[in-house]
Amino acid sequence: MKSTTDPSPLPPTAIRIGLVVLDPFCRTLCRDEQRLHIEPKIFNVLWLMVHSPNQQVSREQLIEGIWQQRVVSDSVIHRVFSQLRKHFASLDDSQDYIQTIAKVGYRLVAKVERITPHTDTALRVAAASGPHAESQVQMEPAAAANLHQIESAARLAIHPAETKSRRNRYWQYRPFLLGIFMVSVFAAGYWLIASTERSTGADPTPFIQQYPLTSHQGSETHVSTDHSGQVQLYLQYNQADKAVLWRHQAGQHAQLLPELQGLRFAMLSPDGRQVVLVTHNEQPTVGCQVLLATLDTTPIGLKPLLNCPTDSHFRMQWRADSRGFYFRQRLDKTQPYSTFYLDVATGQPQQISLPAAYVTNGDLAAAPSPDHQQLAIAHYKTVTQTELQFWQVRGYQRQHTHLVDLAVRQLHWLDPDHLLLVTDKKVYRYHIPTQTHHLVLAEKGYINSLAVSPSRWFVGVSEQNTDILRVALPQSCAAGQRQAAFDAATPVVQSSKMDLLPRISPDGRSLAFLSDRMGVFNMWLKPLAADGQDLMASEAALPSAPAMQDFLRFSWAPDSGQIVYSQGDALYTQRIGHAAPELLLPASAKAHSANWAADGQSVIFGSTQSGDWQLWQYQPANQQLRQLTMDGGYSGYLLGDRLIYSKFNQPGLYQKKLDNAAESLLLADFSVINWLNWQIVGDELYYFKAGLGVMRYHLASGRQDCVFPESPGFVHQYSVQGSQLYFVNAHQVQGDIYWLVPPV
């Protein structure tokens, strides 16, 4: 059991580097009101530089102090320093902070000085802030030990004669030190700010003080609480994406069910006696299971409730009396989510709603009223609208619906007149009688979970950043060569934000991608040289229609002069160099997943305007619109009169002639996960195969091979041009849990 009231050493002193402050307690870089959290490995590299003579490090020092004598490629080290430069530039672009010294290493060129630590003040603030708050601001002993280890590595450069003897001692204790190092370096959780209070951003909402509940290394998610607000459960993810279940009560954090494998979800019942758990097992005979754990027995009892599809994102809410719960489930990715109720005593699920089969999302969340007389269901309507359905529990009859202009993700029923509506980053209080809502909480990160009690709210906040990398094809997909293939990739786009969906132009001169650098997702453009290498010209956001974050896919025209995209069911084209996008088809077209035909004269897109997902063709020159498929179609390419396409509700890749209704199966081993991320380049078709990686299928010969392996961090959002693959690399999710007094 871990006690958050145990004393631990004060964190190291903060460091001023140029105009930026390095706070080792929070693992942040700060300037004025700006605060940038940095990854553990990048932080450790910077900490090593700060404590090295002349703030200079060699490759040997990095391998000794950071990579623990493991063999790493130069590209891995280069990526770390490239990201570090990006961090400094985002806070201060008036000067260079890091210099590369040829054949020597790297050096901090900005002035470095220690500043007075603020920890004592932080502890005093925490002590006055709430129960057990003081303990939450203390640095984990493992993290502090790792910093001292890094400082020791830096001191070896001062006294090289001691290197040999100290290295011998290091190898003697290597297993212990490496364990500490791995926990620290690969941890994804943010360190809490020193004052233990957080502002929720610049949104027009009252200032809400939030206090840390957790102080683990790793990402903490899925927080839930009992009705009293005294007991909480949450999941902690480590670097191997393994989840551990924790219980917090009276300042004590205790691990539960450590032997449970594949844990993905947990929610505590209002009476604090039961927990619903969801596990994913690699064994086909086990798969996904929903379990019920009884906490007041020794040992904790586990009871299987039902099996669940592995690609179904489980969400649920307990009844206030803990007798049962509502949850959503779908058969597979081709089906919408429906709402179910499960009575704990009988263990029998009952289906409540039945969305139309062609609906892409279906039910988003459900919450029963405190007296269990009514049920609220948040149902997907559009990318920016949610339908609130109100059901009478007796007989499960839908009574009425409200439409809200919010993309609701979670739902809570507070009292007879109020709901809490949770979007990606905000929480709204919804007044049912007047159908109005107002903002009560805003976060800078993604709200992965919200738990409410009359006295306390608990919020789990996650953040993740991604890069776009480039690698030459083909690479070996052999098991022993996967890391080497990944190490061969070089960064093209790095911003410490979410950079997604790379699309390289056919001429290789421009890379279009999505990024949330401006708070919401916008389309960005990065110029490239003719050989695909970076130019000095900076990346720039393209003009966009409102709410750009909601469109699904975009693609380049064959002449590289414009981009077509679907957004809010409408179809747009953005000509490069033009000030605004052009509307091709209105929202009534229900357009999704658009691609230019190979001749550049028409656009092929999926639509439900005929009642089910079919492929359509639109010719801008004469404004002609016609339906191309009758038996299903979602995303397709037109090569002359040959249409190659995927379907929304079944795996496989199909083909047909435009003047012939008959279709044939082109590629059977084509998963539905390729709906939006497959492409045709000349005679080659690229798609993703789980467990292998990016596959190349030759249309003429039917031959196929794996050209880039699946590896940790690889996201199957990619684009191919010539012999170059551009793909998304995801860093580990970072997350923490906070508590707050319920806002008015």
Image (cartoon, grey):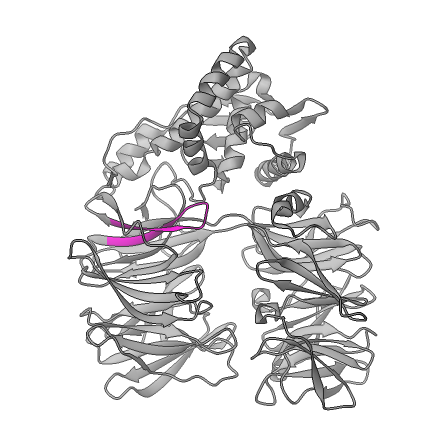
In this picture, residue 689 sits left or right of residue 145: right
Please, which residue is most extreme toward the top here?
Answer: 161
Viewer-side residue, 74 vs 538 = 74
Q: Is residue 716 magenta?
A: no
Q: Main secondary structure of the magenta part?
A: strand
Q: Residue at x 25, y 44 (%)?
A: 253
Q: Position of residue 538 (x, y in %)?
A: 72, 47
Q: Position of residue 372 (x, y in %)?
A: 21, 77
Image quarter where the C terminus lies is bottom left
577 w.r.t. 638: above or below: above
408 w.r.t. 464: above or below: below
Q: Residue at x 16, y 54 (%)?
A: 298
Image quarter where the N terminus lies is top left
Q: Is residue 240 magenta?
A: yes
Q: Residue at x 65, y 90 (%)?
A: 630
**Residue 503 visible in the shown view:** no
In this picture, residue 649 sits left or right of residue 388: right
Viewer-side residue, 403 vs 507 = 507
- Specify the segment rendered in magenta: 232-247
